[in-house]
């Protein structure tokens, strides 16, 4: 038989620079390849496997739901209603939810809400920030504040403006009558794991409220306890008008959700999704939220975040020829490396030593472990990373 790499390269469009390691199984933050070699997973499928691999409760709830997978949104779906209720309760705000299948779709819905909200006052422009990432549809791609992503795919829809920072966003919105919303990530995931300054965000929130500009927070990566709270917005003590969610919500099944306090914005026909919030994904999402809610209450999430933080700070301090500083919040963390070349060799060497780590923009090494990672797994992962860094230190 041909090997996986050959088939993959022959039949899959080449949109990813892929690694051909073959994983066969996983358990919480451990992944095993086809040779039985164990890796500590500090990536959780880019922040998706919030309960880790092979979580007993999640496997059970998905298996139980397999006998009835889908109904269409023409009928009320009990699991979907329960999941929406849970999301709204955890948000501690009065909101309603639209379900879709991915992060970009959650943002697309957010954009549609903003467009409809601005319709009567002839406002439609949405300001996003430099280095932001919001998805890869034509509209959400246009929303990304990274010029390099915009080549090849023009023309783009109108209605998006980029600001270099929050103050500039406020300036633009003050001067242009056509602006209806400002959309941003509180921690830029792809843009270097960069957390926004708290005072600027508080200021932005009150400025937006006073000026009838919607505040859209893209929590596709930062939401669902990734930063230690249900929403990173709660850490910043803000109540956005619109929040988009996806990655960690389904624990591995594809689900996106858009929450808004503009609860009456849509009427039948304004938006829709065939698969959105079907029985299977809603059952999974509900299981993820229930498990994470009790995990948070147990104190283990906060404890392990603290433990992880100590290890991260230590490894940064121990390798000052390679790293400059740590960044991010909770289990959404980065360490800035001196250059991209170093970053790539760390990721490669770390894998050889048994730990999987991610890259982010601005030469940042990125960590998105499963939220249920144990202290033992954290220890093993950082030991492997230290081994990799020792070898790199010896080479430079
Ligand atoms: C991953 C991500 C998206 C896009 O999500 P997809 O599910 O890949 O469409 C959007 N915004 C942020 C902040 C993300 O991290």
Image (spheres, rainbow, N blue to C red):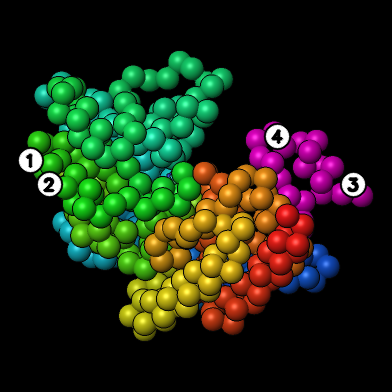
Which residue in the protein does label 3 denote? 2
Nearest to the eye among marks 3 and 4: give it: 4
Residue 103 among those drawn in magenta: no
Residue 36 placed where, x, y %?
80, 71
Marks 1 and 2 sit apart, C-alpha to C-alpha, by 6 Å
Residue 168, labelled with which disc?
none
Q: Nearer the viewer, mark 1 or mark 3?
A: 1
Which of marks 3 and 1 precedes in the sequence?
3
In the image: residue 217, left or right of residue 24 = left
Answer few, some or many: residues within 10 Å of disc 1's Cα (few below 14, many 20 plus, some between 14 and 19): few
Residue drawn at 79 percent across, 38 percent down? 9
Question: Where is mark 4, residue-wise?
Answer: 14
Q: Which residue is mark 1?
A: 210
Instruction: Give the mark toward the camera: 2 or 3.
Output: 2
Closer to the chain start, of discs 4 and 2, is: 4
State the image coordinates of residue 128 (x, y, percent, origin top left).
33, 34
């Amino acid at each position: 038989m041909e090997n996986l790499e050959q088939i993959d390269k022959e039949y899959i469009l080449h949109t990813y620079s892929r690694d051909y390691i073959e994983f066969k199984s996983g358990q919480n933050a451990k992944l095993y390849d086809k040779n039985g070699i164990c890796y500590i997973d500090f990536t959780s499928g880019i922040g998706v496997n919030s309960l880790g691999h092979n979580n007993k409760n999640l496997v059970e709830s998905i298996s139980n739901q397999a006998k009835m997978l889908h109904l269409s949104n023409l009928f009320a779906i009990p699991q979907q209603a329960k999941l929406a209720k849970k999301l709204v309760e955890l948000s501690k705000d009065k909101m309603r939810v639209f379900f879709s299948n991915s992060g970009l779709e959650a943002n697309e819905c957010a954009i549609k809400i903003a467009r409809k909200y601005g319709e009567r006052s002839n406002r439609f422009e949405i300001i996003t920030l430099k280095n932001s990432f919001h998805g890869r549809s034509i509209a959400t791609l246009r929303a990304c504040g990274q010029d390099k992503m915009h080549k090849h795919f023009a023309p783009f829809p109108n209605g998006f403006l980029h600001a270099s920072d929050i103050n500039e966003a406020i300036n633009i919105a003050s001067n242009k009558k056509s602006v209806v919303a400002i959309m941003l990530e509180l921690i830029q995931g792809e843009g270097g794991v960069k957390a926004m300054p708290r005072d600027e965000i508080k200021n932005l929130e009150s400025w937006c409220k006073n000026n009838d500009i919607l505040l859209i927070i893209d929590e596709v990566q930062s939401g669902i306890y990734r930063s230690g709270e249900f929403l990173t917005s709660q850490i910043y003590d803000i109540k956005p008008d619109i929040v988009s969610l996806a990655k960690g919500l389904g624990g591995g099944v594809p689900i996106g959700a858009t929450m808004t306090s503009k609860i009456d914005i849509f009427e039948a026909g304004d938006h829709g999704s065939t698969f959105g919030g079907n029985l299977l994904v809603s059952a999974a999402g509900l299981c993820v939220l229930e498990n994470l809610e009790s995990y948070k209450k147990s104190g283990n999430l906060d404890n392990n975040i603290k433990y992880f933080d100590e290890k991260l700070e230590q490894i940064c301090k121990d390798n000052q020829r390679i790293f400059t500083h740590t960044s991010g919040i909770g289990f959404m963390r980065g360490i800035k490396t001196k250059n991209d070349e170093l970053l790539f060799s760390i990721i490669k060497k770390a894998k050889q030593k048994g730990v999987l780590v991610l890259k982010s923009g601005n030469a940042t090494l990125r960590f998105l472990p499963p939220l249920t990672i144990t202290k033992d797994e954290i220890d093993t992962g950082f030991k492997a990373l230290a081994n990799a860094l020792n070898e790199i230190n010896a080479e430079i």
